[in-house]
Image (tube, rainbow, N blue to C red):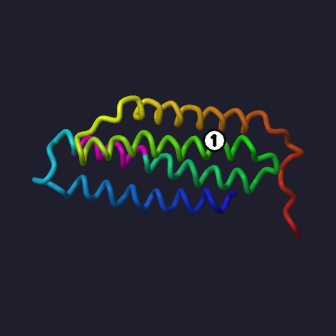
Amino acid sequence: MNRVFFALGSIMAGLAVGAGAYGAHAGATLGAEQAVWIEKAARYQMYHSLALICVSFAIAHWQETRLFQVSGWFFLGGMLFFSGSLYVMAFTGINLGLTIPAGGIAFIIGWGLMAFTGLFITQDTHKKSSP
């Protein structure tokens, strides 16, 4: 699963760069409010793409990884709901209602799970490295 989160984080980071560049350089085709939505969506997408990569390293480091995996899925869901809804608003004007705050809540849950798991995982659950 660590490779899946590493790949997803890398792909989503690349897409965030592309979206941010589009928002910054679209100029006359976007209104000021639309450009702000795209910038915010790309910024949060990038933060949480890097979080997915951190999840992949945590999974590779510890044996007990279920909560790390769950946090990764919350980060991905948060990107889809939070950033995705902002992109939809910017490009179509359609407000998807509570999906933006639901995405923010998913981000918070993901970070909370990462913190909880990192703090309370026992030392004997580190993966043993082969010689």
Quarter of the image where the C terminus is located: bottom right
Q: Which residues are magenta?
A: 35-44
Inspect the image, locate mark 1, and give the three-letter code of the amino acid beneath it: Ser
Disc 1, SS = helix
Work out whether 113 lies above or below 23: above
Within the image, what quadrant is residue 68 found in? top right
Work out whether 88 lies above or below 103: below
Residue 97 place in picture, x, y as percent:
36, 30
Task: Judge whether residue 43 is colored magenta.
Answer: yes
Quarter of the image where the N terminus is located: bottom right
| Residue at 62% in and 32% down | 112
Task: Judge whether residue 75 is colored magenta.
Answer: no
- Using residue 53 as the reference point, say whether residue 64 is left or right of it: right
Look at mark 1 in the image and give the residue it sits on: 71
Residue 86 place in picture, x, y as percent:
33, 41
Residue lying at the far left of the rendered structure: 28
- Using residue 34 as the reference point, say whether residue 125 is left or right of it: right
Work out whether 108 lies above or below 24: above
Magenta span: helix, strand or loop, mainly? Answer: helix
| Residue at 66% in and 35% down | 113
| Residue at 87% in and 58% down | 128
Residue 5 place in picture, x, y as percent:
61, 56
Which of the pair 100/37 is nearer the observer?
A: 100
